[in-house]
Image: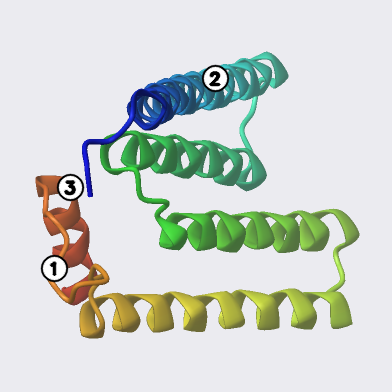
């Protein structure tokens, strides 16, 4: 065939420009959203802590709430550094929230009932989910479509090392 016509060249240039602009806008939104979520998490943790100090005493509920904020902040930090959502951190947050719910329910109602058994079962199910996720990530590491391992960075290496080591 002959040389490409001017319209085809313009179309390719415009497509490239639109793709670059789209990528720029998506990354800008991505970083803005991460900073907003991180700031809101930090603000909520500080406000919760100040409320605890104002009360004059701290309960186990309060401590577990601070752990939830800590896990959320860690999750945002890891996502910011690696662009990977650490699913295990979300499961840890869920376990901590359910534990907080169970402790709060028992301490306020002073009588365990079937709800405690159900919450305990949910915590056990989430613990099994963590085991499955850790096993799957160590046994079946992420690969790209062409079969090559994806480009590694130190955060990925640390996360995988954490997945393959026991928590002892």
Which residue, as the protein is rendered here, is positioned at the far front? 2
Q: Residue at label 1?
A: 149
Measuring from the top left, give residue 46's x and y in whole percent.
Answer: 55, 18
Alpha carbon distance from label 3 to label 2:
22 Å
Alpha carbon distance from label 2 to label 1:
32 Å
Residue 75 shows in this picture = yes
Q: Residue at x 19, y 72 (%)?
A: 146
Dividing the picture into quadrants, the one containing residue 137 is bottom left
Judged from the image, the secondary structure of the residue bearing numbered disc 1 is loop
Report the number of numbered marks: 3
Determine whether 128 is above or below 107 in the image.
below
Q: Residue at x 22, y 78 (%)?
A: 138
Callouts 1 and 3 close, C-beta under 8 Å: no
Measuring from the top left, give residue 77's x and y in whole percent.
Answer: 35, 34
In the picture, measured across the screen, residue 39 lies left or right of residue 55, that is left
Residue in front for this viewpoint, 44 or 35:
35
Judged from the image, the secondary structure of the residue bearing numbered disc 3 is helix
Q: Residue at x 44, y 55 (%)?
A: 89
* Badge 2 or badge 1: first in the primary sequence: 2
In the picture, measured across the screen, residue 144 lies left or right of residue 63, that is left
Q: Which mark is residue 155?
A: 3
Q: Residue at label 2?
A: 36
Q: Residue at x 64, y 54 (%)?
A: 97
Measuring from the top left, give residue 30's x and y in whole percent.
Answer: 47, 28
Determine whether 127 is above or below 153 in the image.
below
């Amino acid at each position: 065939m002959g040389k490409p016509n001017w319209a085809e060249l313009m179309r390719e240039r415009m497509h490239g420009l639109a793709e670059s602009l789209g990528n720029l806008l998506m990354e800008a939104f991505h970083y803005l959203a991460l900073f907003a979520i991180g700031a809101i998490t930090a603000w909520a943790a500080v406000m919760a802590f100040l409320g605890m100090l104002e009360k004059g005493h701290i309960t186990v509920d309060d401590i577990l709430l601070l752990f939830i904020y800590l896990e959320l902040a860690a999750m945002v930090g890891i996502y910011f550094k690696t662009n990977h959502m650490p699913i295990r951190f979300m499961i840890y947050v869920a376990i901590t929230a359910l534990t907080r719910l169970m402790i709060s329910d028992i301490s306020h109602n002073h009588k365990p009932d079937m709800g405690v058994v159900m919450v305990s079962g949910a915590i056990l199910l989430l613990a099994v989910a963590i085991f499955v996720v850790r096993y799957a990530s160590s046994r079946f590491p992420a690969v790209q479509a062409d079969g090559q391992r994806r480009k590694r960075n130190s955060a990925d290496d640390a996360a995988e090392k954490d997945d393959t080591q026991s928590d002892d």
